[in-house]
Amino acid sequence: MISDDLDLRKLTADLKARLGPGEPVGYLRGKSLMRDMLLDMRENRFSELEAEELVDTLESRGFVRFLGDPAERSVADAPWDISPHA
């Protein structure tokens, strides 16, 4: 369960700062990379499942947005837009 006092804007800014240029790429690879980075950043303060839910929450609230179409192979390797200003 994601805490209501978790600052999603700050978390997104921290995530963006830790990612290398052009990362993440690919829908599933990108979500996995962001999940793993959140786990590292938060020093295991939540479970892997909670980190996955957090990535889903960031996506649903517009903080992270996949720029391709995961259903289309030709654009499945598109990058993500990560914006703490959503």
Image (cartoon, rainbow, N blue to C red):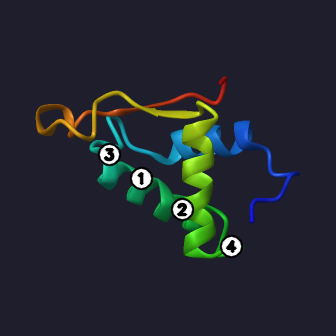
Which secondary structure lies at badge 1? helix
Task: Evaluate if marks 1 and 2 touch, with contact meaning CB atoms under 8 Å apart.
Answer: yes
| x then y, percent, for residue 9 | 72, 36
Q: Residue furthest right?
A: 5
Quadrant including the C terminus: top right
- Choose the circle earlier in sequence order: 3 or 4: 3
Q: Which residue is mark 3?
A: 27
Which secondary structure lies at badge 4? loop
Task: Evaluate if marks 1 and 3 touch, with contact meaning CB atoms under 8 Å apart.
Answer: yes
- Choose the circle earlier in sequence order: 1 or 4: 1
Separation (CA) of disc 3 from disc 2: 13 Å
- Choose the circle earlier in sequence order: 3 or 2: 3
Seen at 75% across and 59% down, the residue is 2
Separation (CA) of disc 4 from disc 2: 10 Å
Seen at 82% across and 59% down, the residue is 3
Q: Quadrant of residue 84?
A: top right
Amino acid under disc 4? Phe
Separation (CA) of disc 1 from disc 2: 8 Å
Is 53 rendered above or below residue 12?
below
Q: Quadrant of residue 44?
A: bottom right
Circle 3 Cα neighbour tier, 10 Å, few/some/many (<14 / 14–19 / ≥20): many
- Choose the circle earlier in sequence order: 1 or 2: 1
Which secondary structure lies at badge 2? helix
Circle 4 Cα neighbour tier, 10 Å, few/some/many (<14 / 14–19 / ≥20): some
| x then y, percent, for residue 79 | 31, 34
Q: Which residue is mark 1?
A: 31
